Amino acid sequence: MNSDEARVKSPTNWSGRLLQFFLHQKFVLFLLILLLVGLNVYVFTKISYVFEPFKVLLTTVSLPIILAGVAYYLLNPIVDLLERFRIKRIYSILVLYLLIAGLVTFLIVAIVPFVRDQIISLSENFPKYYHEAQLLFQSWIGSDVFNEVQQSLGFNASELVQNITAKASSFFNDTFKGLGAFLGKITEFVLAFVIVPFILFYLLKDGKKLPNYITNFIPTGLRSRSYKVMADINGQISSYIRGQIIVSFCIGILLYIGYLIIGLEYSLVLAVIAACTSIVPYLGPAIAITPALIIALVTSPVMLLKMVVVWTVVQLVEGKFISPQIMGKSLKIHPITIIFVILTAGNLFGIVGIILAVPGYAVLKVVATHFFQWFKSRSGLYDT
């Protein structure tokens, strides 16, 4: 037996060829990578206590960073505009800070006392409004005409109302528990609001340098793709934040004008509630209309009709004119997908999850899209 035959029949040579065979099978290699990732995840779940300090750190800094990021996307276009007029960036930021300080002072002095009085009055009277609306609705259900309608349609409205009331009570109890925990960490929020202006200042000053700084830590071959991913993420988040806040502001203004025209009580507070909840797409307006419906129902049937007309007109104006012009179709997310994402994020992370559900999904969608494109180009599984 010569040396070549011995080398071919040797176990080491066969194992090397077998290894080369598996390594050249891209699908098998992909499965091995998934197996290693799953193994790492399993190991990390068993030693999760090691990451507890990082979890505390992330919890501490996440709120001021999120608030500063939202403010950055709102204010950065103004700073860029001032910079085009040959005003140095740092001076533009200082001028903007002075304007914001003046606006906040005006709001505190002129508007906050009025809003505070309406909020206190509404919080004191809302249980009475809710009780009166419940009695009124029960009287409608007990009427002869409604009983005939029930029998003809074959459903029991009393059981339906009881189920809806139980669900609503459970929802509001859970919400208020979450708000209680939310307000229980008041020290963290005060600290966050104190830190936000400092973080925002450096974001406005050096934010454009951040992508290049991050890509310096990425391998050279992946830098261009990584930069493209960050640019797409930045575009998605900026368009969503700016668009959604502008849309919410417009909804609040239109509802306030409409409520003033029809003479609805607590018009300013109800409009502010609608503007704040409209930040959450689709579900927010449904939540915001509830207190307005109750107050209008207790006031008079005519007021209820007027309120429904105002709300319908505002929603039509927002859906047909405001959102298409401001938001466009930048996110390219189906409404059903948005609802499912919001519900899932709310169950997992509470109020914070509901607020961050859509932009978080947009970021994950960008990352997943680019990863899939990279995998298609490298795997060879999609070659025709």
Image (cartoon, rainbow, N blue to C red):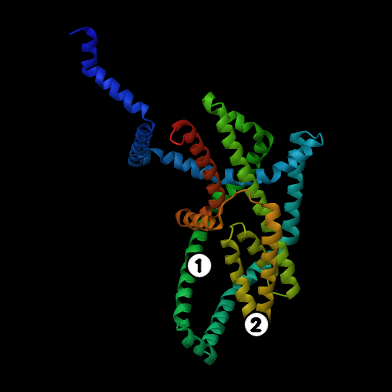
Q: Is residue 69 visible?
A: no
Q: Position of residue 298 (x, y in %)?
A: 62, 80
Q: Is 310 left, or right, of 139 in this rendering?
A: right
Q: Residue at x 26, y 17 (%)?
A: 13
Q: Position of residue 352 (x, y in %)?
A: 53, 53
* Residue that extends furthest to the left in the rendered view of this protein: 1
User: Who is closer to the viewer here, 127 or 376?
Assistant: 376
Residue matched to label 1: 172
- Mark 1: amino acid: Phe
Residue 352 lies left or right of residue 29; in this view the side is: right
Residue type at mark 2?
Pro
Relative to 156, residue 324 above or below: above
Give the residue pinned by disc 2.
Answer: 301
Rendering coords of residue 284 (x, y %): 58, 62
* Quadrant assignment for the N terminus: top left
The image shows residue 71, relative to residue 219, as above or below, that is below
Q: Which mark is residue 361?
A: none
How many numbered markers are drawn? 2
- Would residue 321 be seen by someone viewing this image from the given angle? yes
Q: Residue drawn 70% across and 44% down?
A: 75
Q: Residue at x 53, y 90 (%)?
A: 143
Q: Earlier in the sequence, mark 2 or mark 1?
A: 1
Q: Secondary structure at mark 1?
A: helix
CA distance separating discs 2 and 1 = 26 Å
